Each structure stands twice: as structure tokens, then as C-alpha cells.
Image: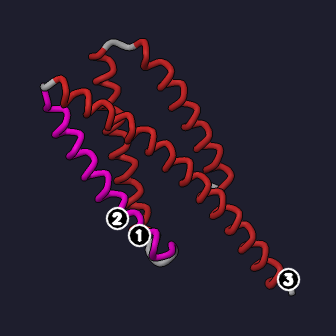
Amino acid sequence: MTASDQLYKLAARTQELEDRAAAMKNKAKGDLEQDVKQARESAQARADGLSKSAAARQGQLSSWWDTTQRAWNDHINHIRDDIDEKRAAHDLKMALRNADGAEADADFAVDFAIAAIEEAEYAVLDATLARMKADELARA
């Protein structure tokens, strides 16, 4: 799959997320809980796939991608443990603090994703330029 194909896939997935976020305001709690469970499973499957992809492409990818990917997995595991602990809280004040924190985390996660998209843009442009330079050298 080419980089531009990946970007189209990213755009489509972002649109799906936007549509799903708009629709969740009208969902029942039980339905939303099921959506949360499915989103967590999907995110875990994507993370597992990313780990396998990085392992399969070892030697092709820059070493810092491996470090970044491992740090990301550690970060996600820590966040999920924290979410699970907070979900168990039954005190109203604690629930309100947890909700505020969850909203702040969600906002930051979106900001992080935007930064990741910008980094992906840079990587795609840099890869295109590197290929162009290699092709020029091959023709010379």
C-alpha cells in the first residue's frame, strides 16, 4: 500500500470517528459501554498489529520507530490500568474528577493524533523526496 493510499485510509478512519462521536451523544449508557469495549479491543488489535509489523520490518525501519512503538504500548497499558481503576470509583466527587480527567485525556489524545498526522505528512514527503533523489542517481 502506498503512502498516499495510507493517507486516504487515515482520512476515512478519521471521518468514521467523527461520525461515531457525533452519534454517541444520543446513545444509551449500555450501548455506549459496548462501544467503549469494542473501541478498546480494536485499539489493542491495532497496537498488536503495529508491534508485529515493526518486528517484521526490523532492519528496514529506523530504530527509533521500535523505541517509539514500545513506549507507546507502555503508555497505553498505563492509561488503561488507570482507566480501569477509576471506573471502579463510586463516589460522586471522584466520578466527577474522573470524568473531567477523561475529557482532558480525550482532548489531548486528539491533539496528539493531529501531531502524529503532521509527522506522517513529513515522513511521506521526505520518503517521496528520498525516492526521487535515488531515482535521479540511478538515471545518472
Of pointers 2 and 3, the one earlier in the residue sequence:
2
Of pointers 1 and 3, the one earlier in the residue sequence:
1
Residue 70 on the magenta segment: yes
Secondary structure of the residue carrying tag 1 is helix
* C-alpha separation, residue under disc 2 versus residue under disc 1: 6 Å
From the image, state whether disc 2 or disc 3 is nearer to you.
2
Tell me whether the residue at label 2 lies in contact with that at label 1, contact meaning CB atoms closer than 8 angstroms. yes
* C-alpha separation, residue under disc 2 versus residue under disc 3: 39 Å
Percent position (x, y) of residue 74? 29, 59
Secondary structure of the residue carrying tag 3 is helix
- The residue under label 3 is 139
Query: Would you call the spot at circle 1 few (<14 residues within 10 Å), some (14-19), or many (20 or more)?
Result: some
Q: Quadrant of the N terminus?
A: bottom right
Q: Is residue 122 above or below residue 77?
A: below
Give the residues drawn in magenta, as a range.
Answer: 61-90
- The residue under label 2 is 70
Percent position (x, y) of residue 105? 37, 41
* C-alpha separation, residue under disc 1 versus residue under disc 3: 33 Å
Answer with the quarter of the image where residue 73 lies: bottom left
- Residue at image location 29% in from the left, 16% down from the top: 29
- Residue at image location 54% in from the left, 29% down from the top: 18
From the image, state whether disc 1 or disc 3 is nearer to you.
1
Q: Residue furthest bottom?
A: 140
- The residue under label 1 is 66
